[in-house]
Image (cartoon, rainbow, N blue to C red):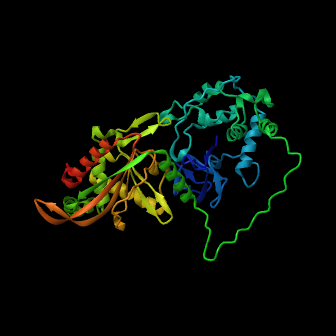
Amino acid sequence: MAVEIIMPKLGVDMAEGEIIEWKKAEGDTVAEGDVLLEIMSDKTNMEIEAEDSGVLLKITRQAGETVPVTETIGYIGEAGEEVEVGSPAGSDVDVKRTEEDAEAATPSQAAPAPKETPKPSATPQGKGGKIRATPAARRLAREMGIELGLVPGSGPKGRVHAEDVENFKGVQPKATPLARKMAEAEGLDLAEITGTGFDGKIKKEDILAVLEAAKPAPAAEAAPAKEEKVVELPEGVEHKPMSAMRKAISKGMTNSYLTAPTFTLNYDIDMTEMIALRKKLIDPIMAKTGLKVSFTDLIGMAVVKTLMKPEHEYMNASLINDANDIELHRFVNLGIAVGLDDGLIVPVVHGADKMSLSDFVLASKDVIKKAQSGKLKAAEMSGSTFSITNLGMFGTKTFNPIINQPNSAILGVGATIPTPTVVDGEIVARPIMAMCLTIDHRLVDGMNGAKFMVDLKKLMENPFELLI
């Protein structure tokens, strides 16, 4: 049975994605994990991997098309298998109609639904945001009119098996996939809708009837349409629409700024020993990795080691369940803010606490390079537990960074500037770098933030401990 390839939902706010390029052609053999295509989300370009092995039977949406999330864009199945589509173009709409018609003619095996539909736990998703399920489970879910994303999976990594679908059949009303999708989009409760299909199955016509009945009565006399006013711009003024990335940044930063009560701690770091250590490490790190160790790498490692101290666990935490519970992380996924020409993105070094300095250099350079070239995968830009942002290379002394939600804090790195400093009773010029820690006061108090910065400052000024 052919399995759908869907446009994945790679973020909470992602509504659609643009297909940039198909990496496989129709008829190509595909193994699970192979890169199928490249898409553009609201943040960056991403490569989407195959969730199943087989042959790429059909591509229904082509490069250059913008497709709503969860919509079918192709099919994978067995060699020689035919995919039924409603027109030669093979549009996704036609595929859905074929499925609905087939289901309307097939007696449903689902048990009558109770009046109140229990809300099951969400099914874990696989790579690229696609639900992990066996072909048999997908087929059975379609035949029974069950939304596969609602079925808890019992297989490895939450993969849904046919038995899971069979056991789940009694918890929701019978409905075609299209009717279920329409009801979800309109916020309708299927348990309150009477189906006119076979054995009471809810069809799209039933949804349309409910929506039509809910429309307000037309006004006795419609108000005349307002003429669209053309605004003449002053000379030298230009209006430019926001890009999708800019909109996403705007929404995220506004939410963070208005949600979290924050404060910022500023510390001066004497970089004398850090500069000396980097000079000694450049050649051996280059020989081992082929890459040059940067101050961002050393600062990142110092942050990771400090975060892993038990007394700083709330610096590496998140608020969950509408800010009613605290999620503590016993690992560090370090986000590193990367500025692009048209916006900002935060790639993530996962499992940084388990890495040596050489490993961290390789991992950080890899995700930063992908971010700059628009090749990040969804997993590489999510799941951070703490973030750092560096504006020092632009001469910025201090600034108040905005927290990358749902992190509890973000560390801003400023410029290193020769500064008169008293050492052993004498005034000498020392390379001083400013560090600015913005903290979510709902999770961390000023004293705890200060203790974290004291430990980080100590490690930064005695960086040989990074190698121990």
Q: Is residue 82 left or right of residue 397?
A: right
Q: Nearer the viewer, residue 361 or 331?
A: 331
Where in the figure is residue 91, as x and y percent of width and height? 72, 52
Q: Is residue 361 visible?
A: yes
Q: In the image as oriented, which residue stretches furthest toward the bottom? A: 235
Q: Residue at x 66, y 55 (%)?
A: 61
Q: Is residue 60 left or right of residue 40?
A: right
Where in the figure is residue 421, as x and y percent of width and height? 18, 62
Q: Is residue 74 left or right of residue 127?
A: right
Where in the figure is residue 142, as x and y percent of width and height? 67, 36
Q: Residue at x 77, y 27 (%)?
A: 200
Question: Would you place residue 4 above or below residue 64 in this image?
Answer: above
Q: Is residue 465 left or right of residue 41?
A: left
Q: Nearer the viewer, residue 42 or 266?
A: 266
Q: Quadrant of the N terminus?
A: top right
Q: In the image as oriented, which residue stretches furthest toward the right? A: 220
- Tell me how many marks there are: 0
Q: Nearer the viewer, residue 133 or 463?
A: 463
Q: Is residue 386 visible?
A: no
Q: Nearer the viewer, residue 245 or 89?
A: 245
User: Quarter of the image holding residue 286?
Assistant: bottom left
Where in the figure is residue 418, as x and y percent of width and height? 23, 67
